Image (cartoon, rainbow, N blue to C red):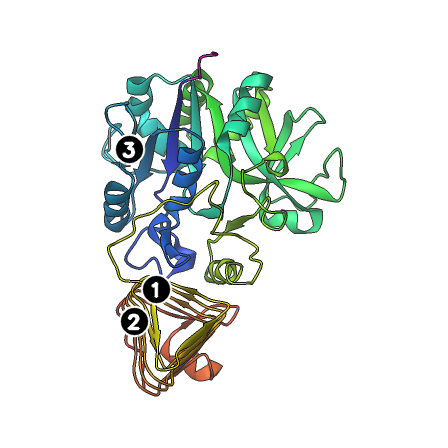
Amino acid sequence: MAREPRVLGIVLAGGEGKRLWPLTADRAKPAVPFGGNYRLVDFVLSNLVNAGYLRLCVLTQYKSHSLDRHVTQTWRLSNMLGNYVTTVPAQQRLGPRWYTGSADAILQSANLIYDDKPEYIIVFGADHVYRMDPRQMVDQHIRTGAGATVAGIRVPRGEASAFGVIDADPDHRIVDFLEKPADPPGLPDNPDQTFASMGNYVFTTDALLEALKEDADDQESVHDMGTNIMPLMVKKGSAYVYDFADNDVPGATERDHGYWRDVGTIDAYYDAHMDLVAVHPIFNLYNLQWPLFTHHPQLAPAKFVEGGIAQESIIGAGAIVAGATVRHSVVAKNVRLAAGAYVEGSVLMDGVQIGRGAVVRKAILDKDVVVPEGAHIGLEPELDRQRYHVSEGGVVVLGKNQHAQP
């Protein structure tokens, strides 16, 4: 039996998430709840653990308390077998400064690498919604002898200017790494598409450490993995792209194969939730062959009484729908909906309370929001903008513990 390579996983989870405000007013972006049960960080950790990578370091920085607590309470692996998922706060190991970029975060945490002595290092972000088998990317990395491999997702050329773009030859060797180019290059096998970087990387350990040290000495660098480290690897001819379309996740359907969403804005976050609630969902939470792991508190099942109904919706444990109507929505744990309440096209997080006769449409209500009897949200755009945060796409957002106005 062939020896498995020694792989260390590093998850970059220090994102401030300003564009997700007010959902990030009190938490780091990777700790933002998603899909009724999960936190955003659960998606990357589930992918890595399902792939058999069980030594994982989660680098944190901004407003990390809820993220630290979630990872500590949820992601407990077998110490006997040397497995772990551990959060690592910014420690100022290289002087009195915080992380100045994703590459600097890894450089300041290089003791993790020296202690573990991996042959290869996976560096994945913590704020995307997707399924992926990282083993297949690592296998390509080893097979090509690359110093660095970045996951690329195919996007139409006309939309690629919003991304970091990868120009690769037919053998997947990267010839250029471009940041939001005006004229993105086409793919060798499809000139109407281009590779956008997913922000997921595999490195040969020595190559990464060498690049991090070289980048640290560059006074002009912003010390970012995509902006600085990958171009260094490209110059050395050791960077390859992994085509995400080739990734085959067990249990994936034709409809959700290759699904990946950057939920970095309120509108993108909202749209990703709406992808979940169709009869045949664009992203399937119910794939038992590649499960999504998280912390499940001890709660009673959801209950529908007094004629309460939910259609094309996800309803979390402990929720009570009492004479209310829920349509095309995601309702998390311990939500209470009173008689006559109507919720449509919305995301309700843990502990939300909707009063009698209240109406909520196209809204995101963070944890423990209270909507009083008869209140309306999402019906009068101008009034909503005076009272609440409203996204460019017209999604009304109430932050944690906020009380809606009558």
Q: Earlier in the sequence, mark 2 or mark 1?
A: 1
Mark 3 and 1 residues: CB-CB less than 8 Å, in contact?
no
In this view, the residue in front, 327 or 270, is 327
In this view, the residue in front, 309 or 187, is 309
Packing grade of label 2 (10 A; few <14, some 14-19, many >=20) is: many
Instruction: Tell me the SS state at disc 3.
Output: loop
Res 112 label: none
Instruction: Tell me the SS state at disc 2.
Output: loop
Res 369 label: 2
Q: Earlier in the sequence, mark 3 or mark 1?
A: 3
Separation of residues labelled 2 and 3 (CA atoms) = 34 Å
Packing grade of label 1 (10 A; few <14, some 14-19, many >=20) is: many
Res 349 label: 1
Residue 174 drawn at (x, y percent):
63, 27
- Residue type, label 1: Met
- Residue type, label 2: Val
Residue 395 drawn at (x, y percent):
47, 70
- Residue type, label 3: Leu
Instruction: Tell me the SS state at disc 1.
Output: loop
Span shown in magenta = 1-5
Classify residue 70 as left or right of residue 308.
left
Does the image show residue 342? Answer: yes
Please name the residue that numbered disc 3 is placed on. 77
Classify residue 146 as left or right of residue 57.
right
Residue 45 vertical position relative to residue 240 in the rendered view, above or below: below
